Amino acid sequence: MFNKSQRKSGYINTRQRIAIIGGGVAGLAFAVCYKRLGGRVDIYESSAKSGREGLGFILLKNGLKAMESLGLGQQVIDVGFPIKRCIILDDTGQSLMEQGLQNCFGITRKAFIDLLLNEIPTNWLHFNYEFSHFKWHENPALAAKAAVFKNGEQVEADLFIGSDGAGSSVRKQIFPEARRSNVKCKELVSMINNPALVQQLNQTFIKYKSLKGSLAVGIVPASQNTVLWFVQFSVDCYNKNLLIQTDYKTFVRKLVGNWPQPIQNLIETTNFSCSYLRMSSYLIPLHRFYKNNVVLIGDAAHALSPFTSQGVNSAIEDTIELTKAIENTKFGCYELAFENYSVIRKATVNQYVDQGIVLQEEFLSPHQPEQKLPFAF
């Protein structure tokens, strides 16, 4: 990715200060990528640990390719679990579709974050830094001067990278008009230690769906011992009062408690206090992903519908393209680098947004013979 002639010609100034706000997948992946240029960054994470919130995900072919660009392809294969088939069944267990998959892996978020952390010097990491706002130069149209955090610290930098997730506080500072789509569906995600079920799944992602639409259960092996599973449901088709209760087990029993095994066993053996309820909405596409010397990556730039399974995959792709843009632009020409990055990534991400809308509508509608894979590619 990076060649010696570009380093000698000064495209990368190792003295430039880069502050990454948010220590999740996108922020850490950029740090790994930029480190390979010979540069350094500082990462400011709001939590006491680095972005381990969340349970797991499916790394798709494009995500694996991006990790290979970081030199971490084999490490992903080592900690992930191969998924070689997708099978879709109805709520009685009858097969609706089966298709082979290539270069797809289930993986826990903790394993993935730890993989990235192993590549980053510990003195680049700063925890308990919750972003508050930017302090701008006298002319706000010029650039942000410092990031101000709620612990009272102020950090000056040449570039600021917002990678603080779907609810990004950095995005709210530079694009306060940004909005998310209405929430039509929700997804309750759980994780369970069950080696026997992992073996039974036989490297297969299984999804059960109601033929009436608006309700589905997915089961994904994420390691030799771990299974991720989720329940997707329409907020309009089910009692909204149930959605705010904390007794998830009772709620899930009412939704899918009579569906085939292993769903019934999963319900009874899952510790739902560790489950995560997320909204199936997406960020209305931004005009661009930057303002002055502040640039967004990952969910901060383009929070995608969970129906795409592209959140983490596209975030890693962002880091590759942003680093290339900085590498290929003369030092100080930040806005040109950010514009190049923004144009390239928006073209791809907007396709994921469109595919997510189609996948959600298919989920909400009664089953049709034409069945799509539940991913955006």
Image (spheres, grey):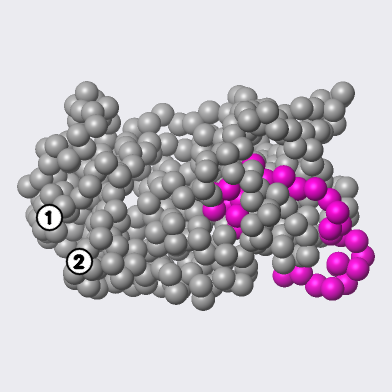
- The percent coordinates of residue 111 (x first, y second) are 44, 62
Which residue matches tag 1? 265
Say which residue appears at 68% left-offset and 28% top-offset. Answer: 152
Residue placed furthest toward the left: 258
> Looking at the rendering, which quadrant does residue 12 occupy?
bottom right
Q: Total of numbered circles in the picture?
A: 2
First in sequence, mark 2 or 1: give its number: 2
Binning the other alpha carbons within 10 Å of mark 2 as few (below 14), some (14 to 19) or many (20 upward) gives some
Extent of the magenta region: 1-29
Query: Which residue is pictured at 72% across the width and 66% down the height?
Result: 36
Residue 255 shows in the view: no
Amino acid type assigned to the residue bearing label 2 in the image: Leu
| Residue 244: x %, y % from top left | 27, 27
| Marks 2 and 1 in Cβ contact (< 8 Å) | yes
- Amino acid type at image mark 1: Asn
Please state, as top left, top right, bottom left or bottom right, where the N terminus lies in the image: bottom right
Q: Residue 301 magenta-drawn?
A: no
- Classify 190 as above or below 105: above
Q: Which residue is mark 2?
A: 197
* Element carrying mark 2: helix
Residue 297 to residue 203: above or below: above
Q: Residue at x 58, y 39 (%)?
A: 128
In the rendered image, the residue lying farthest to the right is: 9
Q: Position of residue 113 (x, y in %)?
A: 50, 57
Q: Secondary structure at mark 1?
A: helix
| Residue 95 as seen in the image, left or right of residue 282 | left
Mark 2–mark 1 Cα distance, whole angstroms, equals 10 Å
